[in-house]
Image (cartoon, coloured by chain):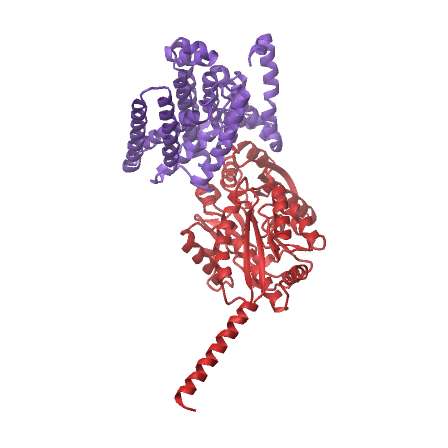
Chain colours: A purple, B red
Amino acid sequence: MDALTSLFLLVDGLTNGAVYTLVGLSLVLVYTTTRVVNIAQGEFVAFGALTFATFMEGRLAPVIYVVAITGAVCLVLDVVRARRQHHNPWRLATIYVLAAVVLAVLTWLALATGWLVLQMVATLALVAALGPIIYRLTVEPKPDNPIIVLVIISIGVSLIMHPLALLLWGADPIPVEAISDQWFDVGGVDVAAQSLFIMGFSLLAAIALFLFFNYTLTGKALRAASINRSGAQYCGIPVIMAGRLSFFLAAALSAASGMLLAPLVTAHYEMGFVVGLKGFVGAATGGLVDYPLAVLGVFLVGIFESFASFLSSSYRDAVVFALVIPIMIWRNARAGADLDNLD
Amino acid sequence: MNKFGLSFCAASLAALCLAQSAQAAEQRPEFVVGVVNSVTGGASAIAAGAVSTFDLLEDRYAKDDTLPFKVRFINYDDGSDPAKSVNTVRKLIQEDGAHLVICCTTTPASLAVNPVVDEARTPNLSLASAASVIDPAAEHPFTFKAPLTDRLMIAYTIDYMLDKGYKNVAFMGLDDSYGEGGWVEFKNIAADKGLNIVADERFARGDTNFTPQALKVSREKPDAVYFHAIPPSSALATAALRRVGYQGPIFHGAGTPTPSFIAVGKKAVEGAIVGATPFTVREQLPADYPLRPVIEAFVTSYDAKYGPGKVDMFSAQANDTMLVAIEALKLATQAGVDANDLPAARVAVRDALENVKDLKGVNGIYTFSPDNHLGIDERSTLLVEVEDGQFKLLAD
């Protein structure tokens, strides 16, 4: 392996890492606030990319029907619960209607104006709305479920979302125009401007999340909600809202990742799952709780994958996923006996 | 005879004729055809086109009074699970009394069903792509298939490569059963014909990056590169190969010639040579191409039911499978089969399948024989080249 090849692989690995970053961060975000290891996180990447691609084609993204129907189900469930607890259901209904109006207006604007920025915002809003809906339908009914049950639930969500994307958008890949078609020459290696966008956005998101969770009251409240549910509730933190908010943010981040990734690999229904799994391996480096370590982890995974694909392409995924084992051993050694106390 | 008597005679004659034709209609033997598709589950994307086609054709044939027989279809879903395919086929044979089975969408399921149909002596038409489902015919006496095999297409492509004087080639394929099937055939045929493989690399459908594999291939400096994959990954991997500086010829398997290949690959796939069936390049066929009328009729009726642009190569394969089935039932009827004597009728339909000759489908011309259960042959394999964003037939 000569120097140029190594450099090529390294740059490629960094691009890979940037792609996985946002999903890795979403996973950490969801886990730290709700204890859900969200296997379905990658599907939001596919939904984001596909929704964006249909908007760019000037068509109505079919995801809006899913949001409308599942949103209506959530509304009914919430109203029933509110009545049982003798709360005022009208306040709830107003919030739902408001959200529906905002989504409808955004979608209409995206279609009517055809502006790229509006299309991006509408895509983010629509796909992100799926986050709290899924949280409401799968996690909220029994929030005290053990972690393993939550994992299995998220696998179920993934098994539903994957074919749903196939049903809504079909099997054909949809090409997406890049924000910029330029390629840069970095020491003999050409890098797509799109890759740099992805890298920049990923790092920004990582820093923003890190600051949000460590230095703002809302961020700290979200963390508290995951560390000790009852304790947080006694301190006046609305735990349910915390879960919905984190699912919303995580879905938005993953959808953004999908929109940025689509120009490089087209939008198709199969694109999300593997990205989600590799983001998971990266996030595992940070024990699913540490943002800076998770970012380091995904870049490690990206570079590892790049070299593994070069050396033995048939086993590259096996090599990448086997990385989880040394990561676990390392984390165990570092954490010592503390890990045994977690459930 | 007065006027009244004449008309009475005519009327009674007409009535007699009617009665006789009605009786003839009732005397048409009734065949039961069981269809098993992966309507749901992992293979549903592949089965979707076939399911739509069967819907369309079953409607037509079940109502068709001009056929010399009646046909009743029974449809099942195997959920993309080979174990369920086996159970479903058993049910079709034992409970539903099927004369002919059409199963299954995928190669693993078809292989699992093979011993079942052999044991029950009931003919089966598989929709799978791998040659191992039917070859050798002596070991699978009751299994037939119409879709083109990888083996046929790859052999044709390798012949072309050798013609052009390429000696060292590289293989890039998907890391799933489709790519693996292609790799096994490519490796064996290349060894038989004396083509040297200098690199074999894999990628996945959901991959976001193909550069490392492309670098590896490009470093081996092959005379040509063969891809066995489907879009978008086949187009993206081609683009990656061009990006790392490979200039030589690029070949693709028969999974690639779809509009999305060009839409995704754009400039990078210009000049790529792609294995194709007449159906996939129907717009580029010469006006006097023998299969044109069949293709046009199928596409028109498909578009009329499902809207334009929906037809794909899986619907084409399903169409041909159904044509072969109907032709075999026709031949069996002509041979005077008694549809009520199930074991004998099944064997008769099987024998009829081996006698289907020169049947024009949308993918090719089918001729079966006791040692050829594939039907389709090299007359139906084509190579096309991407030129100005279009698939153009390659002149030999």
The spot of residue A69 in percent (x, y) is 38, 34
**Residue at the right extreme, as displayed:** B138
Q: Quadrant of residue B299?
A: bottom left
Q: Nearer the viewer, residue A85 or B260?
A: A85
Residue located 59% across and 48% down the image: B104
Residue located 51% across and 20% down the image: A145
Compared to residue A40, the image places residue A111 above or below, namely below
The spot of residue B125 in percent (x, y) is 61, 54
- Residue A216: tell me if it is visible: no
Q: Nearer the viewer, residue A205 or A218?
A: A218
In the rendered view of the protein, which quadrant contains the N terminus of chain B? bottom left
Compared to residue B385, the image places residue A243 above or below, namely above
- Residue A294: tell me if it is visible: yes
The spot of residue A114 in percent (x, y) is 30, 36
Number of labels in the image equals 0
Q: Nearer the viewer, residue A122 or B252?
A: A122
In the rendered view of the protein, which quadrant contains the C terminus of chain B? bottom right
The spot of residue B315 in percent (x, y) is 50, 52
- Left or right position of B335 against A196: right
Q: Nearer the viewer, residue B278 or A15?
A: B278
Q: Quadrant of residue A199?
A: top left
Compared to residue B170, the image places residue B362 above or below, namely below
